[in-house]
Amino acid sequence: MKRVLLCVVATLLVLAGCQSKTGSSSEEKMTVNPPDRDLVAEGLPAFNEKVADLPKTDLEIWLAADYANTEPITDAIEEFKEVYPNISVKTVGIEWGDMSNKVKLAVSSGAVPDMAHAHAFAMGAQGLAEPLDDLWEEWGAEDQFVPGGIQDTEWKGVKYGVPIDVNTTIYLYNKKVFEENGITAPPKTLDELVDVSKKLTKKDGSRYGIVTSASGWSFFGNVIAEGSNNLKFNGDEVTANLNDPKVVETMEKYTGLATVDKSSPVPPPQQRQTDHPVAMFGTGRAVSFISGPWDIARIKNEFPDAYKDLATAPLPGADKGSVLGGGSLFVPKGSKNSIASFELMKWFISDKYGIRLAKEEGRHPVKTHLYDDEFYNDPLLKPYIETLQYAQPYKLEAFPEANDAWGKALRAVFDGADPQEELDKAQKIAERAIENSN
Amino acid sequence: MYWNIPFPYKGVKRMKTETVHEYKSVMKPKRDMHKLKDHIGSYLFVLPALTFLTLFSIVPIIYLIWLSFHEYRLPNPAIFNGVENYIRMFNDALFIKSIGNTMIYTAGSMAIGLSGAIAVAVLLNRKLKGIRFFKVFYFLPTITSEVITAMIFLWVFDNNLGILNYILKVSGVESPPAWLLQPTTAMIILILIGAWRGTAYNIPIFLAALQAVPQSLYEAARIDGANSWKQFVHITLPSIMHILVYCMVMSVIGSFQVVAVVDILTNGGPMDSTMVVIKHIWQQSFEFNYVGYGAALSFVLFPFLLGVTWLQLRLSSGKDKK
């Protein structure tokens, strides 16, 4: 009996010691020669001898679920493996919202992937990403990027990743309804937006002038367009600026569209299909909304009639700019394959695959010169390209507690609370969150 | 003294004391070995369940207690910080609010849920025509996933697209309330959902209890002239009191675990009026990465729930004695 017990305990101990490994490399060397073609002429990164000299390496990469199996990504990986047969790549698709937690757990357990997809600055701020300044310096391509794209990877002056795509928000409106109501140009300031939205709203509730959103990220675009920011940066020092008078005023006017003027429905607490801004615009229940180029493609596909009357303009505001969206690729802390991983990142955003991501998936490129492509001659995309130069990344995401407080404040004001009070509360929480993270 | 030697030693003649002592000193090790073999066998049978319980309940609880005395923010290592997490808890206004909200939710959903369950169980206990048909459906709310339930009620109570407001508008109400966007109505709706699910869960339990009540008591009461209400109050309720206490305890424990419905319906709003304790703990631990603090908050729930359970048992045992 004692022997049986001992066997059982021993088996359990052995099983408890088992742990699966993610990316790995062996000492096995392969001779990798440069291919008989000009990679640069094809719009790909030049052959990298350092990567070719690496031993046999297995990369595990975690991409957002809606990127992982797209053709531009899978084709890029296949071609990369052909050029560097010593590197194998395993792709895992993970829901965008789950990525941060999964990376946290992976880094703390030690079983890290070699590449992940989120906002590299936020991951760097939380100590979850490897710094890549040396690899960027070696590459020397920083000036090719949209400024906001680089900012998405930087925290306190250190680059933690490579941007994969960028976007920003613009004002989308129905030009036919504008003309019918004698409005000859889209609003250029927040006050004009309020007036125009009121004018276009029908009293019986069958049509709203605008659809507002309770997304803290989206509203940040309006804050930038008014010339303010919810954080202040002084070198490496970051301070909360949530209750800045300009921010309070912007929140009051923006939420007032729904709560005071009734020019917009009060946004629901949950994201839904039927009263999504695109659905409301497409069915004629709303004349305008604020969103990004991804919704231009959606209107075209789902509401082709409404697409004929679609026009776009920069976000109305006292200043230029909006929120910068998109994402970046980073090397989670603890991975030993940053050289191979960084090279693969370069391939994803190369001219060849960057423009494919834009045309086939609506994921717009991070390199400035790619916007010279005739694809961007579309007049609907012109305001987007113009705004991109001034778009600011949403750095509050580096402080989850502060980010939550910001979103809650906006939600509370839509539910009837006082903007000053709510932003004062959010400011205190943000100050504490920033202090705790230092 | 003479000893009767029991089976399997029947037939052995009575022996003198000294001989018996000698006998016992020889036989005791053999009996002990036999007992030991029985015990080992029993422990081997419970070993899998015990291992599971240890690995997935006891060890995590011990780890939780250890974590609660540390500052732990992934991926940094845990740093011992004494009782700082507990001190922080007392200054956490939102945690205290979430406990209050959860208690309101518990009291409301328990009161309505258990009353509803008893009422329906009493109805189902009657030999009415077609009652079997209803016996199939009463359990449906419990077997429906919490997420689906929340989605259904969302589409009923949404202020823009909900069916309730549509009916109200058609009936002439110009501005029906935004049910989920006002603190009071949002909490009432959550309580109703909790009660709806709780009723369904407790009906079969009360039905079984009611069916165990001797009919002779009711016959005697009828002979004495007691009406239905008096029979219910003086016979039915006292007979099922032990089941009622059990259901109350389980309702409290279950209500303190509510999170999915809140997440989908209100996300803790409006203005934290429906923020419940488990959602707050989850947010602190996994969204804001205060894992040690979240552990402290979780650990504090245990004596709290224990106290509530003890109070319920005390109150009910006091009623029993009367």
Image (cartoon, helix red, strand yellow):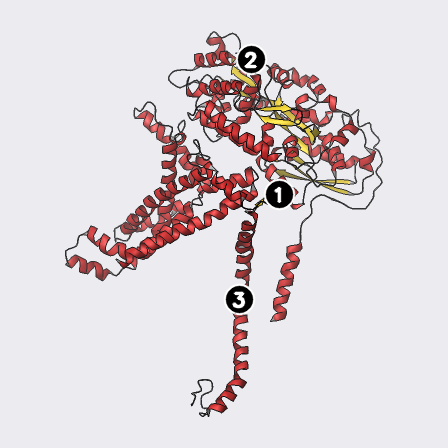
- Mark 1 surroundings within 10 Å by alpha-carbon count, few (fewer than 14), some (14 through 19), many (20 or more): some
Q: Secondary structure at mark 1?
A: helix
Chain of the residue displaying label 2: A
How crowded pointer 2 is (Cα within 10 Å; few <14, some 14-19, many 20+) is rated as: some
Residue A305 in sight in this render: no
Query: Element at badge 2?
Result: loop
Q: Residues within 10 Å of mark 3 (few under 14, many from 20)?
A: few
**Of A419 and B35, which appears nearest the observer?**
A419
Q: Amino acid at mark 3?
A: Phe
Q: Provide the residue designation for mark 3.
A: B45
Classify residue A223 by image quadrant.
Answer: top right
Q: CA distance from mark 1 to mark 3?
A: 36 Å
Q: Which disc is residue A105 wearing?
A: 1
Residue at image coords 80%, 42%:
A55
Query: According to the image, label 2 marks what residue?
Result: A318
| Residue at (57% x, 17% y) in the render | A225
Q: CA distance from mark 1 to mark 2?
A: 43 Å
Mark 2 to mark 3 CA distance (whole Å): 75 Å
**Upstream in the sequence, badge 1 or badge 2?**
1
Question: Is residue A258 toward the left or the right of residue A90 in the image?
Answer: left
Q: Is residue A107 left or right of residue A85?
A: left
